Image (tube, rainbow, N blue to C red):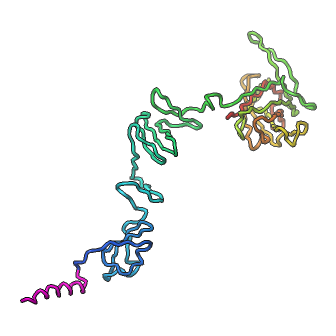
Amino acid sequence: MKKQWFIPFLLLSLIFLLGATWYTWRYRTHATDCTSLTDGRLRDLCFEEDDNTLYKCEAADGLCDTAGEWTVIIPNDAYFKLGGDVATAGTYDFGSASVVLEIPNAAAPTTDATGKIAIDTDLITQGMLQVYLTSALCNVVATTDTPADNEIPKYDSASGTITWEADAGAGGGATYREITLLPESSVLDDNNPPAITVVESTGTGTPRFRVANFDASTDEIIYWTFVLPSDYTASSSPIVDVYWYSDDTGANETCAWGIQVSATTEADTDDMLEQACDADVLVVTEDVNTTEATRLMKTSGTLTYATYMDGAAAGDVITIRFFRDVSADDLSSDASLHSVHIKIPRS
């Protein structure tokens, strides 16, 4: 009877040697490649340390001795933690149409370290996204208003809302510097100048003004010179408005005005006696008013910087060469120029 203890021991040994199913699983790690293991057993788990990937042994013959028998069950791009800081490198992609990422939000949240992001639900009624960058708290605009082209956000502390409004320019000032060029302040061309005359109105008070009368058959020319303002927005495109009228009401009779720019910088290699106009000419056209003769016309165009501005910069001396371009013109009578108005973008 004393030797009967040996029988259970012998049975357990046989079960182990025959690979009995009581074996469960084991957890192990590998620095770089779990699939290189050749002694894995069914249901073993292996964590690959260099890319945070978890593998499971799914052996057909009891042992995972080939790479194909190790199956990824948690890939590295699905790595997550339920607590503590996630400090792994890479991109966290929540790009599913049915997934919403909720950002921490509260009234006056503590956002005081680089990279922290939160919604302050108390700053304004619509909510404000706050991002802490290096040493300062930055507020990102949040508004339910819909913007139109070229509008900027404006905060109203009384209502606690942000709306989109037209840009009023730097410091709340004008968007443009505006210059009005009058015929009497022009320099007439030596060969083909227009006639400058005084016009007297028949209305109450008989207002008087000067006009330059441009002929219908010749490119008559005048010039103006001014200094481009110091706050001119670099490489921007001024807008030109030409105010004129004609003693004509013919249908589809078009008047064409030509504008060229010469820009001279201090110490320019082209000195003041060598300056030349940009080769490109801005031509603006409009038909005369067919309802009544001598009604005021306003014809506009843009001096696109790259095409017409002769490389102008703030502080340059600008000369405008202005003429009636009869080659693009089929108005049969004189065109009387009242003024040229230039809107110069300012920074």
- The front one of 302 and 127 is 127
Residue 14 in the image, given as x and y percentages of width and height: 20, 87
Above or below: residue 11 compared with residue 199: below
Left or right of 23: which side holds 136? right
Which residue shows up at 77% across the image and 28% down it? Answer: 340
Secondary structure character of the magenta stretch overall: helix
The image quarter containing residue 6 is bottom left
Is residue 12 located in the magenta-colored stretch of the structure? Answer: yes
Looking at the image, which residue sits at the far right?
A: 191
Bounds of the magenta span? 1-20
Left or right of 145: which side holds 259? right
Above or below: residue 204 compared with residue 26: above
Which residue shows up at 71% across the image and 29% down it? Answer: 177
Residue 128 in the image, given as x and y percentages of width and height: 45, 38
Which residue shows up at 43% across the image and 55% down it? Answer: 94
Residue 66 in the image, given as x and y percentages of width and height: 40, 81
Left or right of 70: which side holds 142? right
Residue 144 in the image, given as x and y percentages of width and height: 46, 37
Is residue 177 located in the magenta-colored stretch of the structure? Answer: no
Q: Quadrant of the C terminus?
A: top right
Which residue shows up at 51% across the image and 41% down it? Answer: 136
- The front one of 252 and 29 is 29
The image quarter containing residue 169 is top right
The image quarter containing residue 110 is top left
- The front one of 32 and 77 is 32
Looking at the image, which residue sits at the far top?
A: 205
- The front one of 90 and 159 is 90
